[in-house]
Amino acid sequence: EVQLVESGGGLVQPGGSLRLSCAASGFTFSKYAIHWVRQAPGKGLEYVSAINSKGDSTYYANSVKGRFTISRDNSKNTLWLQMDSLRVEDMAVYYCARARSVVLTARYFDSWGQGTLVTVSS
Amino acid sequence: QSVLTQPPSVSGAPGQRVTISCTGSSSNIGAGYDVHWYQLLPGTAPKLLIYGNNNRPSGVPDRFSGSKSATSASLAITGLQAEDEADYYCQSYDSSLSGPWVFGGGTKLTVL
C-alpha cells in the first residue's frame, strides 16, 4: 500500500524556520516526482514546490521562492521542505503528494499524505 | 483568487445527480491541458477521483465522471450518497506566471 506520512509541523513565530518531512513507503520512491501542496485555513489547495525523481530539478511557487527549499534522499525514502522566513500567510496544512506523469503539463497527484499543520503566529 | 473557478457550493438529495464546474482560461484548460479532480474529506488525505479529464483510478465508483470542453471542465456525480459530502477540487497546468500547477478554489458538496 502506498503511504506518505508528513511530520514536522508546529507553531513558529513569523520570521522563523521549520523543516517538514515526508516519509514514503509501499512504492519505489526513487521513480516518482513528489510535490508539496498546502491548504490555508478556509482556503483552497495551493501548489508549493516540486522535485523530480532524481532530486536534480526543483520547482517553487512564486509565493515561496527564495524562502523554501525542497530536497529528497532516495536511500531513505524521504522528502523534506525547509521553510525559512515564515510568514503568517504560510500558515496551512502541508501535504506531500506523489506525482504521476513525467510530462509536466499532464501531471496529477495519485497519492497524498494526511498533512501536517504549520501555524505561524506570534 | 484561484486561477480555476469553481462554484463555492452545490447540493443535492440522495440519489440525484450533481455537477461541479471548473472554468479556466486560454493559459490552462483552454490551452488543451488536462483537468484532474480530487475529493477532500475532513481529516483524511485528499483522494484522486478523475485524471486526464475523464479517467477514473481503480477503486473510484463509476458514479463519478469527468468531462472537458473549451475552457472548462465538469465533474458529475450520479446516484448521490451521504458519503459523497466533501470538498472537491479541480487541477490543471497553467502556462502563465500563475502556474505551473493550479487548483480551483474548491466546491463544498452538501448531500441534503
Image (cartoon, rainbow, N blue to C red):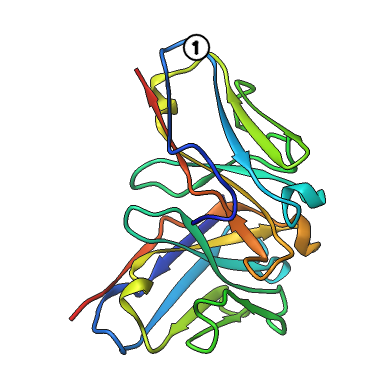
Tell me the amino acid under the disc marked 1.
Answer: Gln
Q: Position of residue A22 (x, y in %)?
A: 48, 70
Quick one: which residue is furthest to the top in this view?
B15
How many residues crowd mark 1 within 10 Å: few (<14), some (14–19), many (20+)?
few
Above/below status of A63 relative to B46: below
Q: Residue at image x 68%, y 34%?
A: B56
User: Left or right: where does residue B99 sit relative to residue A82?
Assistant: right
- Inspect this view and state whether residue B58 appears: no
In what quadrant of the picture does the C terminus of chain B appear? top left
Quick one: which residue is furthest to the left in this view?
A122
- Give the labeled residue for mark 1: B16
Judging from the image, mark 1 belongs to the subunit labelled B
Above/below status of B81 relative to A1: above
Q: Dividing the picture into quarters, in which one does residue A38 lie? A: bottom left
Q: Position of residue A122 (x, y in %)?
A: 17, 81
Count of numbered marks? 1
User: Left or right: where does residue A114 sit relative to residue A1?
Assistant: left
Q: Secondary structure at mark 1?
A: loop
Q: Position of residue A51 (x, y in %)?
A: 65, 75
- Inspect this view and state whether residue A120 appears: yes
Q: Dividing the picture into quarters, in which one does residue B65 lie? A: top right
Q: Residue at image x 76%, y 64%?
A: A104
- The residue lying toward the viewer, choosing from A15 and B15, is A15
Q: Position of residue B25 (x, y in %)?
A: 70, 50
Q: Residue at image x 69%, y 39%?
A: B72
